[in-house]
Amino acid sequence: MNIQKNTFGKEEKLCSEKDIDSLYKTGQSFLNFPLVFYHLAAEGTGASKVLISVSKKKFKNAVDRNLVKRRLREAYRLHKSILSKVYHLGFVYIGNEILPYEQLEKAMVDGLQKIETAQDKSE
RNA sequence: AAAGCAAGCCGACUUGUCGCUGUUCCGGAUCUACGGGUCCGGGAGAGAGGAAAGUCCGGGCAGCACAGAGCACCGCACUUCCUAACAUGAAGGUCUCAUUCGUGGGAACGGAAAGUGCCACAGAAAAAAACUACCUGAUGCUUCGGCGGAUGGAAAAGGUGAAAAUGUGAGGUAAGAGCUCACAGUUCUGUUAGGCAACAAAUGGAAAGGGUAACCCCUGCGGGCUGAAAAACCAAAUACACCCCAAUGAAACGGCUCGUUUCGCUUGAGGGGAGGGUAGGUUGCUGGAUCCUUACAGUGAUGUAAGGACUAGAUAAAUGACAGGAUAGAACAGAACCCGGCUUACUGGCUUGCUUUUUUU
């Protein structure tokens, strides 16, 4: 059990168009199948903000997109304590099939750890 | 009992842990114009569908447009009814296809006697039909027996075709013909009894030169355009244009003056005001042609009355993850302003009706 609560409220979601633009243009990215991670160190305090994207091209039905997004959100919620700083993050799902939660969780953990080490190096 | 067909209904359970979005209550902090608002913590309770989908029709609602009328364009087209409205709704009629003869499906169901066009192939001819064969038999020729076939008649026969001028029989005729008659069929129409009506039965009269309106067209009825990314409100920084104040000017170089350069003096440095409304926020937004139950009316769609209920309101978009139990890793699938209908997708199950087979009485 973490001391910190594993919440995921509205203030942890990346909504502003400006922030999304800057994340895609100036942020760094890498692939950890089935996810592409975008990350950018954010200023200020508070919680990291997260953007989750599942393409309409890959999943035609809204139900399928929602399922994948929910699983990704759950995986992030349970493992976000890996991050030590404040970031703007973007997760883009590029798989062609709906993967079980176990695989998504593993990919999420690896990805978050990579972000952490990459940011340490750049500083 | 099993199988098949049709119609209708249900559309998924439960325990624990963590988590998400509204509502409401309690406590604390903070702001206040004392109405309340914001934030934090905790409790309670609520939280996707029968199709939420496709966006195919119709309406509410909103904005814009709008004297009136006509044309064009688009849609609809048997009858009556229901409805806020529509029909692709209900009930019925007609035609048509299938049939186990019970019934079920389909209809692109106003007009071809307003006009135009078209009717492949075949056929003489596809709309005012003469090819063969039939009747008539001029002039001419003749061995006086006839030969020949102009002209005209004729839709009865042949063959072609999806379709050839209503069918059969009789009379009639030069040969024929609805030319006449009998029976039958088609269209229009009068009367009588049925039905609100479409229609349909009997009976009388009239007419008949085909199909195609899913070629154009004609007739009748309806339709303003755009959709919640509509619309209303609040509104920071930067930039933009406007108004006001403002001049023997301003800025750069320079320690200062002169000077030089640039800008301004109709085009405005600087200050102020008031705009529009981009990021974002609030309203729209969920109490409604609402849902449930019962009774009554109706064949039915549906309507009326009474009682009860409040039942998502998100904004990158809330229902998930893990572990366990029950046949079990359960189909199609996720609200986005709201409602009525239609269409399409589908797991498992239930109910009703009909048919067939078997068993029992």
Image (spheres, grey):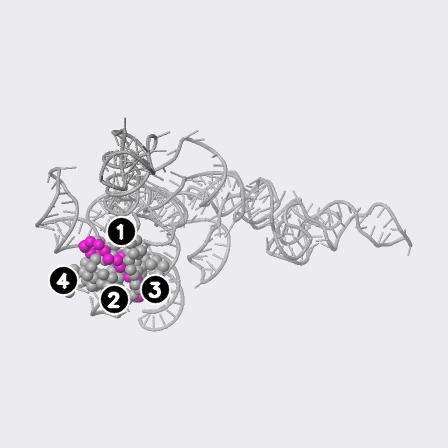
The answer to whether tags 2 and 4 share a subunit is: yes
* Residue B350, quarter of picture: bottom left
- Residue tagged by mark 3? A96
Chain under numbered label 4 = A
Q: Looking at the image, is mark 3 or mark 1 earlier in the sequence?
A: 1
Instruction: Identify residue type, mark 4.
Output: Ile
Quarter of the figure with the N terminus of chain A: bottom left
Chain under numbered label 1 = A
Mark 1 lies on a secondary structure that is loop
Instruction: Identify residue type, mark 3.
Output: Asn
Bin the neighbour count of mark 2 within 10 Å (Cα to Cα): few under 14, some 14-19, many 20 and up.
few
Q: Where B104 falls versus B307 (above or below)?
A: below
Instruction: Identify residue type, mark 1.
Output: Ser
Quarter of the figure with the C terminus of chain A: bottom left
Number of labels in the image equals 4
**Can residue A2 be seen in this snapshot?**
yes
Measured in 3D between alpha carbons, the distance from the residue under mark 4 to the one under mark 3, in whole angstroms, is 37 Å
Q: Looking at the image, is mark 1 or mark 4 earlier in the sequence?
A: 4
Residue B229 picture location, percent across and down: 32, 46
The reply to whether dot 1 and dot 2 touch (C-beta < 8 Å) is no
Bin the neighbour count of mark 1 within 10 Å (Cα to Cα): few under 14, some 14-19, many 20 and up.
few
Q: Looking at the image, is mark 2 or mark 4 earlier in the sequence?
A: 4
| Bounds of the magenta segment | A33-51
Name which residue lies at 24% across and 57% down.
Answer: A41
Tag of residue A4: none
Name which residue lies at 19% across and 61% down.
Answer: A84
- Residue tagged by mark 1? A16
* Mark toward the viewer: 3 or 1: 1
Instruction: Identify residue type, mark 2.
Output: Asp
Measured in 3D between alpha carbons, the distance from the residue under mark 1 to the one under mark 4, in whole angstroms, is 30 Å
- Residue tagged by mark 2? A110
- Residue tagged by mark 4? A3
